[in-house]
Amino acid sequence: MADRPVIIVGGGIGGLAAALALSLKGIRSVLLEQSAEFREVGAGIQLGPNVFRRFERLGIRRAIEADAVFPDNLIMRDALTGEEVTRMPAGERLHARFGMPYAVTHRADLHTTLLRACQAQPLVTLRNNAKVTGHRDDGTGVSVTLADGERIDGDSIIACDGLWSSFREQIVGDGKPRVSGHIAYRAVLPAGDVPDGQYENNVVLWAGPKTHLVHYPLRRGELYNLVAVFHSNRYEEGWNSFGDPEELAERFANQQPQVMNLLGKIESWRMWVLCDREPVAEWTRGRVTLLGDAAHPMLQYLAQGACMAIEDAVCLADHLAASRNDPERAFVAYQKERYLRTARVQVMARVYGDFYHAAGPVRELRNQALAGRTPEQAYEGNAWLYGG
């Protein structure tokens, strides 16, 4: 029934965006987060023009921009030779092409903005320490059971419970995530600790054989975000373990001094194993649907995981508002609208990972292919993503 709340499982970026989007459509929700507090683990996140259109819809664009940094360029450099492979202007020129800006921000800042917006909405109920252990869908309504035995009744369920989603296992049943063989180390430096002459207002990717390093400023330029990725067979579930600086130095040995200087500034790294899943066309069953990483987890090479979750949230709210008394119909329509776009991002993220990590003749071919690419050609190559 439309008077019962939509139950949202998971208080990350996707879950909060869904609650906010629903509230703006006059739809009540209760959001259940298993942790003791709402918080986001991680550091930098890139925000393409496509997600800024959703920020406008959610009424949070100005708040996002207050914390963000707007880079001048997106640049790829060869980590072995130091040569610039290609650059795409990311300032006013990109804004003019796509009608929205490109920015980078701290994941925690984005999460906090969404959280505050939800807290200001009377139609959103936020609950911590609310671990969901089971659910029922009887065709006319749903309920979830919490770890302490409490039962919560609702109209429908949106599962935003991430890469290791228990709801996905029941709906899709495709087992554990696919381990990519790539590991990411991330760290944040105070801007004043960046080696002399290396601070720049750009998103820079140093492409090396089976490695890459990305760096860019964060939080109004006060911080500097570093993400180092390399191939490895190591596997640790989760994405917030401590990394090994010696392993990092070994993987990036013989690369440009600028790369090694930045890596050498960090004594404590957090690491996570990069995983995704095969794209699927169906992630809905009855009155239960998936959103974000639960539906379409992707590698980070297109910097679109959170952006896709926010796109999901706005799309799903539109369909629920249009079919308020028939959530099953709304969920199928949402899934139909989203699955090919998200599948394309999943597939292309894998391709870009191979592209960034190319070695030998493939690396040389990559550099030759991108040399001389004009900004207009770069924009056109990304129009399917940023224009969406």
Image (tube, grey):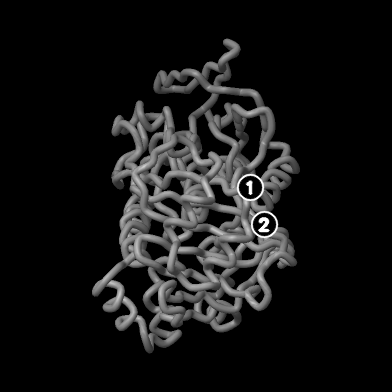
Please state the horizontal and vertical placement of residue 60, each as a whole percent of the image: 68, 57
**How many numbered badges does the structure rendering display?**
2
Q: Residue furthest top?
A: 149
Q: Report which residue position mark 1 lands on.
A: 24
Label 2 to label 1, Cα distance in Å?
A: 9 Å
Q: Is residue 320 above or below residue 132?
A: below
Please state the horizontal and vertical placement of residue 101, each as a whole percent of the image: 59, 72
Q: Is residue 332 above or below residue 194?
A: above
Q: Look at 31% across and 67% down and name the residue there.
A: 358
- Which is more foreground, mark 2 or mark 1? 2
Q: Look at 52% across and 71% down and name the residue there.
A: 204
Q: Look at 56% across and 65% down and name the residue there.
A: 215
**In the drawing, does residue 386 fall left or right of residue 263?**
left
Classify mark 2: helix, strand or loop: loop
Residue 24 visible somewhere in the drawing: yes
Q: Amino acid at mark 2?
A: Gly
Q: Quadrant of residue 125?
A: top right
Q: Report which residue position mark 2 lands on.
A: 59
* Disc 2 and disc 1 in contact, CB within 8 angstroms: yes
Please state the horizontal and vertical placement of residue 189, each as a whole percent of the image: 67, 59
Q: Residue furthest left?
A: 361
